[in-house]
Every structure is written in C-alpha cells, then in structure tokens.
Amino acid sequence: RAGLPVAEAPVGPIEVSFEFFPPKTEKMQENLWAAIKRLEPLNPKFVSCTYGAGGSTRERTHETLVDIRNKTNLEPAAHLTCVSATREEVDEVARRYWDAGIRHIVALRGDSPEGMGEKYVPHPGGYAYAADLVAGLKKVADFEISVAAYPEIHPEAQSAEADIDNLKRKLDAGATRAITQYFFNPEDFLRFRDRVAAAGITAPLVPGILPVTNFGTVCRFSAACGASVPEWMHKLFEGLDDDPTTRKLIAATVAIETARKLVSEGAREFHFYTLNRADLTYAICHVLGVRAQAAAEPAEPAPASA
Ligand code: FAD
C-alpha cells in the first residue's frame, strides 16, 4: 500500500511507549507531569525514563519512575547504563528498582564520560557492553529488558554485521525487545528490519520516533549518536529559526508521514522520544488510531495570538 488516507484506521491495534527524561527544576517537573497526564489515557505499553550520562541522574531517574509507579497506572521502565560504574554499583541500582516494584529495564552501555563520540573505555570492574549488562541484570532479578538498536549502525561499530551480532547477543542474554535510535528516513528502518530478520532475530524491533521540536539541537546531537539528518529535512526547516509555530506543524507532518509509512509496511509498535512534551506525540498517536481510553487532560492552552 503506497499511502494510507488519514481517515482510514490502521489495520490492527498499534502499541506505543513513551520516553521521558528526569526533570532538573520544579518548572521542568510540572512540564513532565503535564505531559505524563496528557499521554496516560493513550494506554501506552510502558513509559520509560532516561538515565543521564554516566549515571548523573541516578536519583532523579529513580524518583521519577517511583512516582510514575505510585501515581499512575502506567508501567514504568528504567533506563540504566553501565558506563563508569562497577558491576556492584549497577546491580545495586537494579536491585533498588526491583524492590520499588519496577520490573522493566532499558539496558544500555552509555557513552564515554568525555562526551558522545569520544573513545569508550570500559570500567575495569564494570560491565563492558550492554550485552554483559543484560546478562548481569538477569542474575539480579527476572526483569523484562529492552535494548537499543541502530538502523544507521552505531557509530563505534566495527561493521553493520558486527552491530547486528551485538544486537543478537543482547537478545540472547535475555532482552526481549529492541528499541531503535531515531531516524528520519523510513527506508533506513525498513532496510535495517530486513537485515535483522535475515540474521534470525525474531524479537520485536520497535521504531523510535523523535518528533522534532528544535531542529538545530537535533542536528548537533544526531551526528554523534548514529542518526543522520537528511538534506530534505534541512530544506523543510530552512528559514524557520524564529518561527516555532510553523516548525511544530512541520515536525508533526514529518513524524506522521514516517509513522504512517511504517504502518503501511507492517509496523505495529512505536516508541516516542517525547522530550517531556505531549502535544506532537499525542497528535501522531491520534492519527495512528491510538485514542484516549478515558478523558484526556486538556491540551496545552493555545498561544494568545492563535
Ligand atoms: P552496546 O550494545 O554495548 O554497543 C555499543 C557499541 O559497541 C556498538 O558499536 C557495538 O557494535 C559495540 N560492541 C558491542 N560489544 C562489543 C564487543 N564485545 N567488542 C567490541 N565492540 C562491541 N544513553 C544514556 O546515557 N542514557 C539513556 O537513558 C539512554 N537511553 C537510550 C535509549 C535508546 C532507545 C537508545 C537507542 C539509546 C539510548 N542511550 C542512552 C544512548 C546509548 O547509551 C548510546 O547509544 C551508546 O553509545 C550505546 O549504547 P548500547 O546500549 O547500544 O551499547
């Protein structure tokens, strides 16, 4: 199917998950909770909270997830990295999650403390790579574990094959789902999905969707994290640096077109990098036929000029 009319409901139910980051200030905390409350009625499969570089947000990530567990009906999933920490420290963080009733971990290696793109050196007493972390977590408790995958290949991978072998090792060690890095060309995901299937991997490969709120930031961030920003995106956002309203409409269109293309190619599960904002994610879900199961929180008020 080449296109999917907006009015046509996608075939089969679509499942979604939402990613947040731990807030630093009270204002950010309010924004996070407004986003959670708005998205909660969409009944996501789980919601996750990131772990700041090298564990820098350890306590805030923990608190956010415990709050989600205690104040909502959502299933919380804790991102956890193994960079710059001993095995014992990582195991202790995981054990605290288990004791707090959190059963799902997004297990990641993390990046060098010097910054993304710098050479990664495993901690001498730590888990060296995410596959080792997954195996270690399974020894701590019977967590559900999701891991990362890279449609455009992880920047440090020796080859595309080596990266897929690594994904396989993570799943063989006990992970049950791979969430992809964001991408903007749906074909990159579809080609990767074919290669993953050809490698005999049957676990769900969930496309990660990043609704673009700040194009400049996305460009700076993407180079180091294994995602490319295609020329057509530069053209779309050209001249809009001071026009957030138009940028937002375009961002929604780009993400909706990507998601609908993937649905037409059989995707039924999506992970949204929400950046703690609900509006674009909510709109994309709506188009995909993911509707509120109960009354949703009202949308953010429109600007006075709208
Ligand atoms: P790994 O799977 O360990 O792979 C890293 C690299 O090492 C790959 O190139 C792989 O091919 C290679 N490799 C693996 N094993 C070996 C080996 N034995 N020998 C040689 N090379 C090997 N970062 C955070 O800090 N906090 C977060 O909360 C966070 N959340 C994320 C969520 C998602 C969905 C994604 C896609 C990424 C996230 N990241 C996060 C970023 C992630 O930490 C980085 O992309 C990191 O560089 C790689 O993590 P990984 O788990 O994919 O690593």
Image (spheres, rainbow, N blue to C red):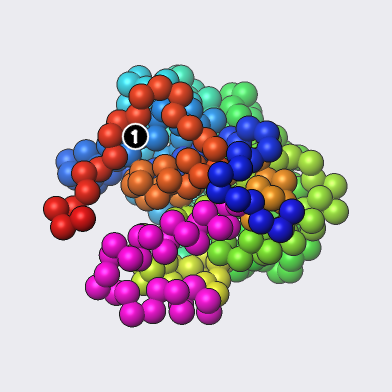
Judge whether residue 145 can be spotted in this image.
Answer: no
Q: Tell me: residue 189, above or below residue 19.
A: below
Vertical placement of 255 versus 281: above or below?
A: below
Front position in the image: 287 or 102: 287
Residue 299 % position (x, y): 29, 40
Residue 15 appears in the rendering: yes
Q: How many marks?
A: 1
For ligand 1, tell me if the residue under mark 1 lies within 8 Å: no
Q: Give percent across and percent down for residue 46.
A: 51, 32
Asked if residue 136 lies left or right of residue 42, the reply is right
Residues drawn in magenta: 231-260
Q: Nearer the viewer, residue 260 or 177?
A: 260
Q: Dividing the image into 4 quarters, which one contains the N terminus?
A: bottom right
Residue 217 screen position, x and y as percent? 36, 68
Q: Secondary structure at mark 1?
A: helix
* Magenta stretch secondary structure, dominant: helix
Assess whether residue 235 is covered by the magenta stretch. yes
Q: Is residue 144 magenta?
A: no
Say above or below: 301 vs 72.
below
Where in the image, quadrant-wise, is ligand 1 located? bottom right
Please, what is the three-letter code of the amino acid marked with disc 1?
Answer: Arg
Which residue is depicted at the point 35% across and 60% down? 248
- Quarter of the view holding residue 218: bottom left
Disc 1 marks which residue?
38
Name the residue rendered at 68%, 34% in the picture. 12
The residue at the point 67 percent across, 64 percent down is 188
Quarter where residue 212 is shown: bottom left
Q: Which corner quadrant holds the C terminus?
A: bottom left
Image quarter of residue 246:
bottom left
* Residue 236 x, y percent position in the rendering: 45, 74
User: Which residue is depicted at the point 65% across and 48% down?
Assistant: 263
